Image (cartoon, helix red, strand yellow):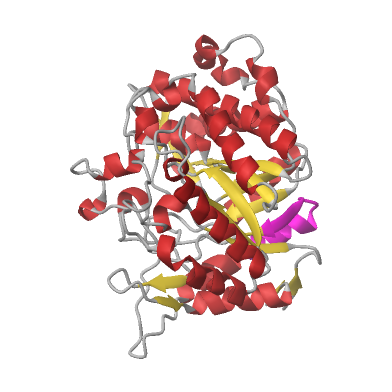
């Protein structure tokens, strides 16, 4: 059976700067919080870091050719803030900006629409030293950075993404400590969440002023929560609070102009007059990242009355240990359709890490990844047939890369990267996605 996507459906692919660029000491790039985090013993698997990564800083043309040959129509990439402004504020690094000039021009020369993400986690360390996202002054700092990028590249950018996964920045980086900057301060994490929202609102206004005809959105990895079957009665009441924390704290003020009632007591100390109006800026699309279902159970002695639970054993898992569940993907899309006015939705990340073993001929027949994308794309089509306004899909990721605290152990790419030689080898999943993009259909 063949199922067709809408005729104007857009196909793309995603990456992020710190995960692929490398070039850490090239052309005046400043330090990021991930450089510091990686240098902290015990934080990243095998003591690895992103200083070389996929060497995209020098191999970008080859990587853009891979995107073109796949048939992708657009490419969501991110700019590294300290490559452009090494201290986060003040002086602009011309060599850093020139790199993104070349990259954007290279996309346009190949018929690829540039989708620029302003922030994908690589905060300048110089700003972290001044309080980082916990310092309200960062709203102005981020606005100044946005202004620099918009004025230099805005004439060629086809869509703007202000933030990738601000909830991960707040909760995982500042409450759980599993991402840079590695803090474990729940109250500060609430302040960080509010400052991220304020920064999104400010950046949106700046982008609309400088590039009024270019769509602006942000990307959220939404979580659909479930209880363990044997604990449903005692834990079901926590589902709403969990989803308010992970989704509502970032979606509600943008789409509705207020924070969820369930988190207001925690958020009120950080609110000032006019803040909610500043955040409540119209967006042109919603980026959605989704990988797995979130199972939760009640707990005591933590900042929140729930914790993550291991999903039931009947689920297949990726190498990350994440449960594979296309039904969850469908239900998450439906949240945007039913609770947030069914905005234009672009799937900006979706994919799985698997054990990719090369055959004797060097080819990688990653059927597990193909099965994953087939299941999730089927779920996407189910949602579209019920009226969900999904307009595009970008698998994560173009190529294997530095996977944050997991180092280089986990591979999500459609293209295999040999980190010793930097050789790129398209996997079977690359050809699978190429066929889908060419035919706009799923068989």
Residue 304 at least partly seen: no
Where residue 40 appears, as percent x and y from the top left, is 21, 40
Image side of residue 18 versus residue 118, left or right: left
User: In the image shown, does 313 or 181 lie closer to the viewer?
Assistant: 181
Q: Is residue 387 magenta?
A: yes
Q: How many marks?
A: 0
Q: Is residue 425 magenta?
A: no
The residue range painted magenta reads 377-392
Could you say which quadrant of the image residue 413 lies in?
bottom left
Could you say which quadrant of the image residue 254 lies in?
top right
Image side of residue 441 versus residue 402, left or right: right
User: In the image shown, does 194 or 106 lie closer to the viewer?
Assistant: 106
Where residue 305 appears, as percent x and y from the top left, is 42, 24
Does 87 appear above or below 114? above
Q: Residue at 64% of width from left, 41% of height from top? A: 151
Residue at the far left: name it: 41
Q: Residue at 32% of width from left, 48% of height from top? A: 405
């Amino acid at each position: 059976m063949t199922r067709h996507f809408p005729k104007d459906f857009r196909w793309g692919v995603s990456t992020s700067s710190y995960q692929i660029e490398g070039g850490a000491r090239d052309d005046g790039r400043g330090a990021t919080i991930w450089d510091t985090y990686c240098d902290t013993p015990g934080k990243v698997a095998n003591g690895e870091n992103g200083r070389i990564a996929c060497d995209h800083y020098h191999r970008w043309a080859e990587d853009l050719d891979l995107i073109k040959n796949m048939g992708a129509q657009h490419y969501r990439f991110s700019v590294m803030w300290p490559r452009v402004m090494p201290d986060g504020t003040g002086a602009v690094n011309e060599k850093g900006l020139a790199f993104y000039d070349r990259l954007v021009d290279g996309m346009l020369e190949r018929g690829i629409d540039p989708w620029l993400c302003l922030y994908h986690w690589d905060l300048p360390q110089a700003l972290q030293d001044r309080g980082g996202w916990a310092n309200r002054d960062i709203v102005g700092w981020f606005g100044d950075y946005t202004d620099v990028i918009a004025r230099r590249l805005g004439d060629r950018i086809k869509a703007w993404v202000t933030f990738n996964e601000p909830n991960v920045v707040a909760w995982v980086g500042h409450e759980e400590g599993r991402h840079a900057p590695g803090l474990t301060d729940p109250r500060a994490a609430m302040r960080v969440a509010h400052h991220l929202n304020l920064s999104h609102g400010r950046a949106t206004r700046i982008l609309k002023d400088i590039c009024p005809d270019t769509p602006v959105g942000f990307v959220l990895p939404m979580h659909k929560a479930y209880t363990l079957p044997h604990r449903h009665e005692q834990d079901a009441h926590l589902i709403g609070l969990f989803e308010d924390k992970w989704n509502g704290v970032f979606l509600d003020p943008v789409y509705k102009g207020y924070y969820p009632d369930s988190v207001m007591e925690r958020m009120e100390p950080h609110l000032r007059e006019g803040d909610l109006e500043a955040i409540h800026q119209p967006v042109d699309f919603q980026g959605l990242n989704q990988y797995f279902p979130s199972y939760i159970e009640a707990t005591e002695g933590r900042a929140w009355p729930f914790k993550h639970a291991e999903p039931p054993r009947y689920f297949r898992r990726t190498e990350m240990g994440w449960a594979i569940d296309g039904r969850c993907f469908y239900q998450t899309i439906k949240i945007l359709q039913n609770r947030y006015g069914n905005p234009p939705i672009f799937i900006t990340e979706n994919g799985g890490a698997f054990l990719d073993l090369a055959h004797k001929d060097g080819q990688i027949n990653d059927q597990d990844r193909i099965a994953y994308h087939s299941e999730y794309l089927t779920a996407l089509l189910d949602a579209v047939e019920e009226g969900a306004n999904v307009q595009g899909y970008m698998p994560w990721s173009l190529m294997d890369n530095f996977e944050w605290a997991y180092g280089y152990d986990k591979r999500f790419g459609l293209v295999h990267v040999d980190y010793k030689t930097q050789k790129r080898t398209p996997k079977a999943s690359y050809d699978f996605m190429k066929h889908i993009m060419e035919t706009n259909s799923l068989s």
